[in-house]
Image (cartoon, rainbow, N blue to C red):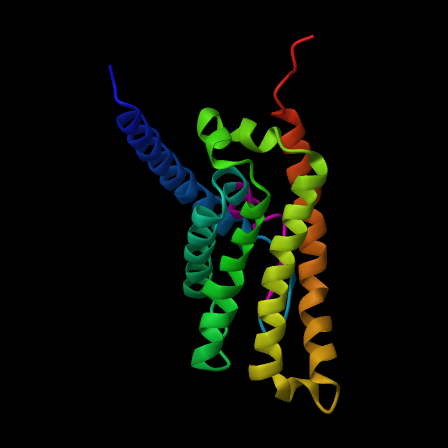
């Protein structure tokens, strides 16, 4: 008979393998989706067809720890593929930090023990209430938006041309981040509802 500690270690090990594999696929899919842009902003940033969805999905399936890690790696990859540099410090704020904050969606994930009991990651997200999924997307996107706004105020102030730099940065980054938030919510909600566990009558 396995000891409780051995069972817990096995579950933790299995969860790590699942999160690593899923995270790798999410980063690859998100990167692929980021290539197809609807709006391309002149000083960096773009509206895509849901490139944030795979990363936010991982955060909801595995929690904040894995969510932050996967999102930060995705951000670094975004810098490698399509860099826009105003200052060396802006690289950190606009890529690993901004994208890493998408991991905030993990705050709305199911409790850890509940997640580990459900090995089907699609059902993990599907079991969440719709309002919780939408709120996760909103909070995650707001986290990324705040990082980009701060970067704009500190490193892109010259583009404001006499305007209020805070309003300019908020308007610039909100132009693509708000629609991205709406698109991600509209895509993730139906996906979650499809995999919602059925209740026995």
Q: Quadrant of residue 81?
A: bottom left
Seen at 42% across and 62% down, the residue is 76
Examine the rendering and report whether any part of residue 69 can be seen.
Answer: yes
Residue 12's x, y, as percent?
34, 34
> Does residue 76 sit above or below 1 in this rendering?
below
Farthest-out residue, top:
201
Examine the rendering and report whether any part of residue 46 can be seen.
Answer: no
Q: Nearer the viewer, residue 17 or 32?
A: 17
Q: Is residue 53 magenta?
A: yes
Farthest-out residue, front:
4
> Does residue 128 sit above or below 38 in this rendering?
above
Q: Which residues are magenta?
A: 45-57
Residue 195's x, y, as percent?
60, 25
Q: In the rendered view, does 33 fall on the left or right side of 10? A: right
Q: Nearer the viewer, residue 143 or 175?
A: 143
Q: In the rendered view, does 180 fall on the left or right side of 68? A: right
């Amino acid at each position: 008979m396995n000891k409780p500690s051995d069972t817990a270690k096995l579950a933790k090990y299995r969860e790590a393998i699942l999160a690593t594999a899923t995270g790798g696929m999410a980063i690859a899919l998100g990167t692929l989706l980021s290539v197809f842009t609807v709006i391309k902003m002149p000083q960096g940033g773009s509206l895509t067809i849901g490139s944030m969805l795979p990363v936010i999905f991982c955060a909801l399936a595995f929690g904040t720890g894995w969510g932050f890690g996967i999102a930060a790696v995705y951000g670094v990859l975004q810098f490698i593929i399509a860099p826009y540099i105003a200052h060396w410090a802006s690289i950190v704020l606009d890529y690993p930090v901004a994208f890493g904050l998408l991991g905030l969606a993990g705050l709305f994930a199911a409790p850890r023990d509940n997640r580990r009991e459900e090995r089907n990651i699609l059902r993990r997200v599907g079991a969440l209430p719709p309002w919780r999924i939408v709120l996760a997307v909103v909070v995650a996107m707001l986290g990324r938006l705040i990082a980009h706004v701060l970067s704009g105020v500190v490193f892109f102030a010259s583009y404001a041309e006499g305007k209020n730099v805070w309003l300019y940065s908020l308007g610039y980054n909100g132009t693509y981040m708000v629609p991205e938030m709406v698109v991600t919510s509209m895509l993730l909600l139906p996906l979650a509802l499809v995999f919602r566990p059925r209740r026995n009558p």
